[in-house]
Image (cartoon, rainbow, N blue to C red):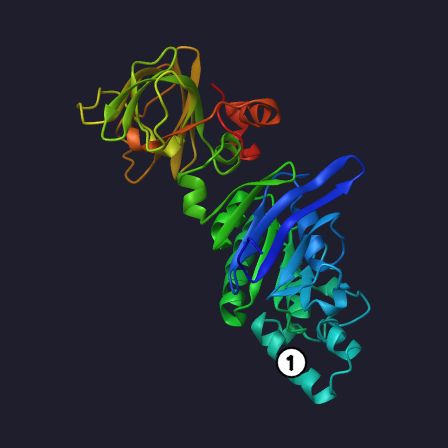
Amino acid sequence: MATDGFLIFENVTKRFGAHAAVDGVSVGVQKGEVFSLLGPSGCGKTTLLRIAAGLETPDEGRVWLDGEDITDLPPERRRVNTVFQNYALFPHLTVAENIAFGPRAAGWPRARIREEVDRMLALVQLTDQAGKKPRMLSGGQKQRVAIARALINQPRVLLLDEPLAALDLKLRQRMLVELDLIHDEVGITFVYVTHDQGEAMGLSDRIAVMNRGRIEQIGRPAEIYEAPRTGFVAAFIGDTNFLEGRVEEHLGDNYCRLGVEGFPDIECFNDTGRPPGEPVCLSVRPEKIRISRERPEPAPHVNVVPARVADAIYLGTHTRFWVRVGRHRVAVWQPHARFLLDERPIRWGDEVWISWHGDDGFMLERFSGADAALVATPPERIGAANGGVAP
């Protein structure tokens, strides 16, 4: 096997007709980690999860679990359990009976079932709900029952398929904390499928970002966010500004000068050694950019650009600005570490200066095809669509 790990997908491909839902994926999930498959609808993440569960068979490639080839094993022989978005609880059974269903079907002794059910109820903090039917529970409680029912079977891997998608925002945030605590308690491998980058960033040890059946990047959340390898990853993980330009010259110390229409010369860290003349797309996160009425003092490698405020939205913790630089519309998020009501805030139409350090820009290849469509999401909607600000 060319890939290392506890759960390994080796050159896995799955087609539905002419469409490759999963296209030659090789990835290794380490024992005990929370590994997220992140991407938009239709990218192949759920298909890959179903292949791990034995609910789909790959057309090509193999699946390995702890050194054993499980590609052709039926689901019940895999020691892998799945938690689904819709909970899949038995409505006529109580919470305790739902949790006990798997062990009873497997013929466990009654005393052991009682002991393990009690342990699971305590783990998911539902001991006082043991006698209730699913219809009497909240969405978060139902999800905890589903997790307990999966964990009681002592799987080696727990697969979670969009488990929080049906919950409201505050409940999702609370359940993320609870999932993290449950993982710390049981210590087994979690594979978590989601289209929500916030969930993946908050829970995962590592993330695989998927696009059109392939994995675009694997890494720790900070690596994915701070150093995206492709424009798709930069756009899908958080919000960003994209500025198309060209490498003009090398400046030494791994910096280069970029030419971007409508901007003064821009300095950018160039650790990849992109040569002069190469067209690039510069990604700069909105929170990396500073905004002020006064021109900042010159500093090494700091880009300073005049702009005009096109829009401003006050959100309590921060204000979101959109400023015009030539034909470009640039997003700037200003945090409110201190906010004095007697100070005049920056408003629509103000002439301002924006600035960012050359280390905070990241050069990527220019976009084409479907990736460009994602990046071109209007800036007014980038928070809702996980898209970028188009140049």
176 relative to 342, above or below: below
Tell me the quarter of the picture where residue 120 sits. bottom right
Give residue 42's position: percent from left, percent from top: 69, 39
Q: How many marks?
A: 1
Tag 1: residue type? Answer: Glu
Residue 193: x percent and y percent? 61, 50
**Residue at horizontal 71 percent and vertical 54 percent from the top:** 51
Looking at the image, residue 206 lies above or below residue 121: above
Say whether residue 97 is visible.
Answer: no
Instruction: Specify whether 358 is left or right of 260.
Output: left
Whether residue 256 is situated above or below residue 79 in the rendered picture: above
**Relative to 267, 371 lies left or right:** right
Label 1, on which residue? 116
Q: Quadrant of residue 301?
A: top left
Residue extending furthest toward the front:
1
Dot 1, how many residues are within 10 Å of its Cα: few (below 14), some (14-19), or many (20+)?
A: some
Position of the N terminus by quadrant: bottom right
Q: Is residue 146 above or below residue 239?
A: below
Q: Nearer the viewer, residue 98 or 18?
A: 18
Whether residue 135 is visible to the viewer of this picture, yes or no, is yes
Please state which of residues 195 and 218 is positioned toward the viewer in this rendering: 218
